[in-house]
Amino acid sequence: QKEVEQDPGPLSVPEGAIVSLNCTYSNSAFQYFMWYRQYSRKGPELLMYTYSSGNKEDGRFTAQVDKSSKYISLFIRDSQPSDSATYLCASTDTGANSKLTFGKGITLSVRP
Amino acid sequence: EAQVTQNPRYLITVTGKKLTVTCSQNMNHEYMSWYRQDPGLGLRQIYYSMNVEVTDKGDVPEGYKVSRKEKRNFPLILESPSPNQTSLYFCASSRRAQISYEQYFGPGTRLTVT
């Protein structure tokens, strides 16, 4: 079992929709949970990160972590065509290497 | 502008011909890392460096070498490339290993080995 599982999609929604992107993880040592956005032909860009359980909001984006169920979510409100990208969830522990373990990514398309 | 740069961005080569992909960051970051991204497999770490002269293997190090002689540079070396190393490669950096959740990624190098 891969340590971070992510539905590969793709996902297509109309502009203005609320988008829910989800991942699960298996390693109980993970403490940091990240969402990266990757536009075509670009490197991943950190959207936001959360430490342990809880919610974090940044504009139209909300990250949510439930450590009891090992579930990671990203919600996008009022989705825009500019949100069309691949979204990668990632997790890490607090060890010396702090290696990021990524999900496979989900491609989101927001239709005008 | 704070950034991670990689060169070349695109490279087509033949099996066995040694190549180097350069990576440089201008943020004075201690931690640097190389990943490869493949369809269906996602991003996987090849090598990482916690500081100058300190490097270690990631999840898929076979066929790759790295060095960290200067803080800003972290080249990836393929001594004898093979077709299974055809992939999209990313270099990344963060201030310290302990805050690797704030990694900044380069634009990527698309490598094709024929």
Image (cartoon, rainbow, N blue to C red):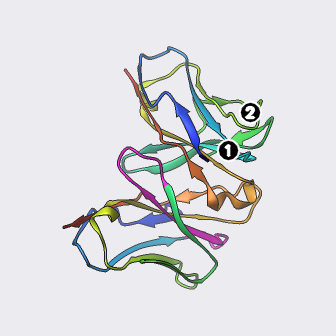
Identify the chain of the residue marked 2, using the numbered disc in the image: B
Q: Residue A29 lies in magenta, yes or no?
A: yes
- Label 1 element class: strand
Q: Which mark is residue B32?
A: 1
Q: Which mark is residue A2?
A: none
| Amino acid found under the numbered disc labelled 2 | Arg
Which of the 4 quarters of the picture holds residue A81?
bottom left
Residue to which mark 2 is pinned: B68
Task: State whether residue B62 is above or below residue B105.
Answer: above
Question: Magenta residues?
Answer: A26-44
| Amino acid found under the numbered disc labelled 1 | Met
What x and y, as percent, mark residue A55? 54, 84
- Residue, x 47% and y 39% (percent of image)? B108
- Residue, x 61% and y 37% (percent of image)? B61
Which of the 4 quarters of the picture holds residue A79?
bottom left
Cα separation, mark 1 vs mark 2, equals: 9 Å
Whether the residues at callouts 1 and 2 have beta carbons within 8 Å, the answer is yes
